Image (spheres, rainbow, N blue to C red):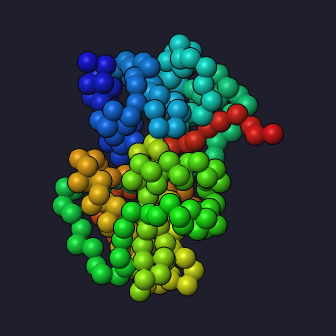
Amino acid sequence: MMNNIAISYLSHNVAQHIDMIEALRRGNAEVLGVTGTACLLRNRGNYALQLACDTAADGVKLLQNAPAFGLVVAHGDAAVCAVKTLRPDYDCRRPCHQGYYPSKERHAVPPTCTIAPYPIDRLDDVLAHYDNVRDPRYIIDRIEKGDLFAGYHEGQLCGFIGFHSDGSMGMLEVFLAFRRLHIGFALEQNLINVALDRGWTPYCHIYADNLPSIRLQEKLGLIVTPDCPVAWMHAPRE
């Protein structure tokens, strides 16, 4: 029942809340609180709180009743204000757009590269090329869960892509020697198909200043939010 109420509220703005909606649909989140004007989830994939609210006061009410928290993914200015009200020291990582694929139509992936589950014995290649995550345990978890995929061009490993633990598409990297061959396009086309095969709505987070990635998502048929509604907020790092 709580899930249905939460999805009903979040569905008033699917583009802004697709990560929260999908977390609930995939059984990857629990509802910590929901009203007609706000929703607070805990994502089981990365243990972050996810907050959406109509006003900062609505968000504060839910956060005040939440257990101790670290990372908060705030959706929109009101949610950011709510977090800052209770945690003035919280910083915001680079703001993100969200993009989601609204169709059920699979992509016809061109033979630009061969795509297969990522091999665990090439873990070092991920760590050498992917800067956003430095913990090898996280990458190993993605590989073991079948959520990371490798691209091969003429038999050589040329890049990778996968699903993050929160359910979003990401980790897209094409090695320098293989760029401008449309390999990144093919890798994401394939990942969209994998998500559809699993019954998911494919979605991703895109840094607001990453214009090439925004153009790539739009070319792939994703709807990208016109503003920057998602802020990853956390305590200052020492």
Q: Position of residue 66 (x, y in %)?
A: 53, 17
Q: Position of residue 110 (x, y in %)?
A: 28, 79
Q: Is any atom of residue 74 visible in this view?
A: no
In the image, farthest residue toward the top: 65
Q: Residue at x 73, y 31 (%)?
A: 89
Q: Position of residue 47 (x, y in %)?
A: 52, 32
Q: Residue at x 55, y 84 (%)?
A: 177
Choose between 163 and 118: the one closer to the eye. 118
Q: Is residue 79 above or below residue 220?
A: above
Dividing the image into 4 quarters, which one contains the C terminus? top right
Q: Is residue 98 above or below residue 210?
A: above
Q: Is residue 219 above or below residue 49?
A: below
Q: Is any atom of residue 151 visible in this view?
A: yes
Left or right of 189, for residue 44: right
Q: Quadrant of residue 28?
A: top left
Q: Quadrant of residue 107?
A: bottom left
Q: Is residue 157 above or below residue 29?
A: below
In the image, farthest residue toward the right: 238
Left or right of 158, for residue 182: left
Q: Position of residue 147 (x, y in %)?
A: 41, 53
In the image, farthest residue toward the left: 105
Dividing the image into 4 quarters, which one contains the N terminus? top left
Count of numbered circles in the view: 0
Q: Residue at x 54, y 53 (%)?
A: 139
Q: Residue at x 23, y 47 (%)?
A: 199
Choose between 174 and 56: the one closer to the eye. 174
